Amino acid sequence: MRESFGSWKKGLKIAWNDYLKQIERKLPHRSMSKKMTKRTRRDADSMSFSLSRWYRRISEMKPSSATIIIVVIAFAIFVLGGGVFQIIAQTPLTLYNGSTFFFVYVRALGGSGLDNQLGMDVVISAMLYSFGIVGFLLMYQSTKNAYKPRNAYISLIVGATLVAFAYIFLETVIAIKQA
């Protein structure tokens, strides 16, 4: 019984303690700490323990390319939608003119049209830009499904529809603002 219990250790061809040390050296949290620069490590050591732990985690993080692409696209949609202007100008979300709510800033409210916007302008334009980007991604994915013509055709039609929807409604919003 004693012999059969230790027989699996012989298959390792190294001592059990040495094996554990090798595994411990290969753990991700061990190997990543060596990739920090000296300045980063010095800055992390000068902070409190909880901040230091978060700072080290963030500085050692390696996000996937998909995560980076999603963050870049979201930032582009935010900027193109007018999010920076909304933060700086701090305009209201909607306007109420006696009996009507306005979600898009129109020239009839006293502005010149395109240089003024409401909070809903940002939301509407960002949503429409998102539809357009999703449409382009669907059209791109349809080329990858060439071996499945039905799926390729459906994703191409849905993608083209989303792009057309986004373009038509963005032009409509601009026309409403100029009217």
Image (spheres, helix red, strand yellow):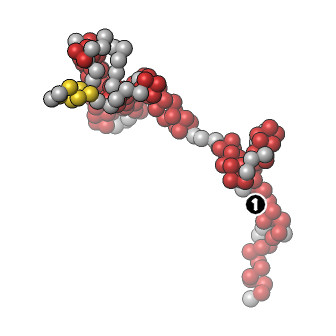
| Coordinates of residue 135 in the picture (x, y in percent) | 34, 29
| Coordinates of residue 129 in the picture (x, y in percent) | 36, 26
> Does residue 165 lie above or below 36 as drawn?
above
Other residues around mark 1 within 10 Å, as few (<14) / some (14–19) / many (≥20): few
| Coordinates of residue 142 in the picture (x, y in percent) | 36, 31
- Front-most of residues 160 and 105: 105
**Residue positioned most to the bottom:** 1
- Whether residue 136 is visible, yes or no, is no
Helix, strand or loop under label 1: helix
| Coordinates of residue 7 in the picture (x, y in percent) | 76, 78
Residue shown at 51% from the left, 30% from the top? 72
Instruction: Name the quadrant containing residue 151.
Output: top left
- Whether residue 109 is visible, yes or no, is yes
Identify the residue under disc 1.
Answer: 23
Quadrant showing the N terminus? bottom right
> Does residue 8 lie above or below 54 as drawn?
below
**Residue positioned most to the front:** 98
Answer with left or right where residue 22 lies relative to residue 91: right
Residue shown at 39% from the left, 24% from the top? 81
Residue type at the position of mark 1: Ile
- Front-most of residues 151 and 34: 34
- Front-most of residues 85 and 131: 85
- Front-most of residues 97 and 21: 97
All told, the count of numbered labels is 1
Residue shown at 84% from the left, 65% from the top? 18
**Residue positioned most to the left:** 99
Residue shown at 52% from the left, 37% from the top? 66
Instruction: Name the quadrant containing residue 25.
Output: bottom right
Answer with left or right where residue 10 lies relative to residue 109: right
> Does residue 125 lie above or below 42 as drawn?
above
